[in-house]
Image: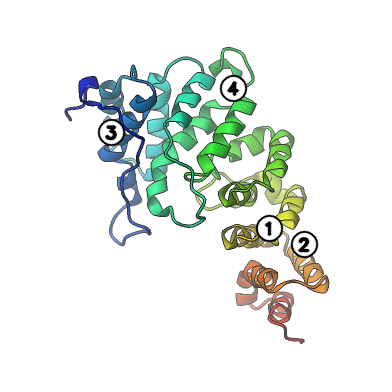
Amino acid sequence: MGMDRASMTPRAPTIPSAPSSIQKGTPLKHLLGQAAIECLAHNIQCVDSAFPAGQFCTTALTGLEPLAIMQRGRHIARTLHQFLPGTYAEAVQVLMASLTPEQLDAETMGLAGFFYLPHSFFISEYGQDAQHNAGNDPFEVSMLALHALTTRFTAEFAIRPFLIQQQQRTLEQVNRWVTDPNPHVRRLCSEGARPRLPWGTRLASFVADPTPTLPILERLKEDPSLYVRRSVANHLGDIAKDHPDLVYATCERWLREGASADLQWLIRHAVRYPAKGGNARALKIRSAAKGKVV
């Protein structure tokens, strides 16, 4: 592999190039292969010259090949925990300092952002337990890390264990983020709390009772970013799988209140699957959201 500290010339953090979308016949797991691991080691050495890059890379590559992308993210995170210094707070500070600049353009990241999947797992696996942080509560440190991470990739997976284990505390933070100037942070407020997020841990509490997230969706439904509004629509679509009448009533109320064209699109998107299934109420809502009376 040829990785040693002498070869790690300090430079600005970067991430490997990647396609903008999934390529047929190319497994996503290759986004977290040797190039990504070596790049991660380089980035950390930009801010911590003592980081044992060679040992980290050797350990991270061991047993990597058969793992799918999410398993790779967790495996690399555990290797980071083995080699990063000090407490969780100290280690995550190094990780966050090694990030590339934050993104403001909402949908330009493509698949390259999966480089940060190990960072996501590092926060979710070690960011709640005081035993990893010299007995100190790491919650606030983790929230700062999630905020930083989601402006480069997404923290929608990492925030879910916090919503499971510290729901009220995490929702309070999420409600403070809904006015953040960065659209990635605002999207996290909806996407991270989706009851049935694809690839994410199911939030059983919100599957059973989604009402705690409804105030978030209310505040984001007219967001200026389509990236955020699409997440709100998909969040409502998740809720509709278990509580369709709640979603229908919400959409009908928004229409009665005079939904803008953007909100009408969101409403149509939210009920598209029950409408495709022939649900009469969903079909009526979609029709009304197109300006038609039925």
- Whether pointer 2 and pointer 1 mark residues with C-beta atoms closer than 8 Å, the reply is yes
Distance Cα–Cα, label 3 vs label 2: 48 Å
Distance Cα–Cα, label 2 vs label 1: 8 Å
Circle 2 is placed at which residue position? 246
Give the amino acid type for the residue marked by disc 2 in the picture.
Answer: Leu
Q: Which of marks 4 and 2 is nearer the N terminus?
A: 4
Which structural element holds mark 2? helix
Q: Which residue is drawn at 36% across and 44% down?
A: 68
Which of the labelled discs sits on residue 239, or is there none? 1
Q: Foreground mark, 4 or 3?
A: 3
Q: Which of marks 2 and 1 is nearer the N terminus?
A: 1
- Whether pointer 4 and pointer 2 mark residues with C-beta atoms closer than 8 Å, the reply is no
Distance Cα–Cα, label 3 vs label 1: 41 Å
- Whether pointer 4 and pointer 3 mark residues with C-beta atoms closer than 8 Å, the reply is no
Q: Residue at x 47, y 44 (%)?
A: 152
Report crowding for label 2: few under 14, some 14 to 19, many 20 or more residues within 10 A (C-alpha): some
